[in-house]
Image (tube, grey):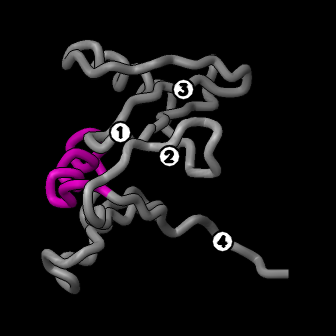
């Protein structure tokens, strides 16, 4: 059996990789890595700790994200502590960013969409 350590990255297609990289950096504090190797060539890797999102340009005219009936990634989730979840909620409300709250019994989550409509979840298991 193969023993996996952790997810290295999730690759997503975006319309404008530079703008998307900036959005992930500003919204979640992710840092761009490997620019010294790849420069402005894709992918743009934006990371927090050992977790990265690889941004690739779309090919052709992008289609809308598939609905729940399609076999596709439904969302990308980042774990945060309770204080950061509440700070994110306040930031979203202050900036007018649309979000949804979900109580999953074992976790609380906020959902937003990135500039290309990918669903992003911030979740905490600190319910107290």
What whole-number distance in Å separates the C-alpha atoms at marks 1 and 2?
12 Å
What whole-number distance in Å separates the C-alpha atoms at marks 4 and 1?
29 Å
Place of residue 26 in the rendered image (x, y in percent of width and height, measured from the top left) = 20, 43
What is the count of numbered marks?
4
Which comes sooner in the sequence, label 4 or label 1?
Answer: 4
- The image's mark for residue 5 is 4
- The image's mark for residue 117 is 1
Which comes sooner in the sequence, label 1 or label 2?
Answer: 2
Which comes sooner in the sequence, label 2 or label 4?
Answer: 4
| Comparing labels 2 and 4, the label whose residue is closer to the camera | 2
Viewer-closest of 75 and 59: 59
What whole-number distance in Å separates the C-alpha atoms at marks 3 and 4?
25 Å
Which comes sooner in the sequence, label 1 or label 3?
Answer: 3
Place of residue 16 in the rendered image (x, y in percent of width and height, measured from the top left) = 18, 56
Q: With 112 as the anchor, is 60 left or right in this view?
A: left
Pointers 1 and 2 in contact (CB under 8 A)? no
Answer above or below: position of 110 versus 18: above
Residue depicted at 35% across the width and 39% down the height: 117
> Does the magenta segment cover residue 22?
yes
Answer above or below: position of 81 versus 5: above
**Position of the N terminus by quadrant:** bottom right
- What crowding class fits label 3: few (fewer than 14 Cα within 10 Å), some (14-19), or many (20 or more)? many
- What crowding class fits label 4: few (fewer than 14 Cα within 10 Å), some (14-19), or many (20 or more)? few
- The image's mark for residue 76 is 2
Place of residue 127 in the rendered image (x, y in percent of width and height, measured from the top left) = 63, 20
Q: With 66 as the anchor, is 103 left or right in this view?
A: right
Which residue range is magenta in the image? 14-30
Which comes sooner in the sequence, label 2 or label 3?
Answer: 2
| Comparing labels 4 and 1, the label whose residue is closer to the camera | 1
Q: With 56 as the anchor, is 125 left or right in this view?
A: right
Answer above or below: position of 12 versus 103: below
């Amino acid at each position: 059996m193969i023993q996996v350590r952790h997810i290295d990255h999730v690759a997503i297609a975006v319309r404008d990789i530079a703008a998307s990289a900036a959005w992930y950096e500003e919204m979640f504090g992710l840092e761009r890595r490997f620019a010294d190797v790849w420069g402005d060539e894709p992918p743009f890797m934006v990371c927090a700790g050992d977790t990265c999102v690889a941004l690739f340009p779309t090919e052709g005219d992008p289609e809308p994200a598939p609905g729940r009936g399609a076999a596709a990634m439904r969302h990308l989730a980042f774990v945060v502590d309770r204080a950061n979840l509440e700070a994110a909620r306040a930031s979203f409300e202050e900036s007018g960013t649309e979000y949804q709250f979900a109580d999953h019994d074992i976790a609380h989550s906020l959902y937003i969409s990135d500039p290309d409509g990918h669903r992003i979840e911030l979740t905490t298991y600190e319910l107290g």
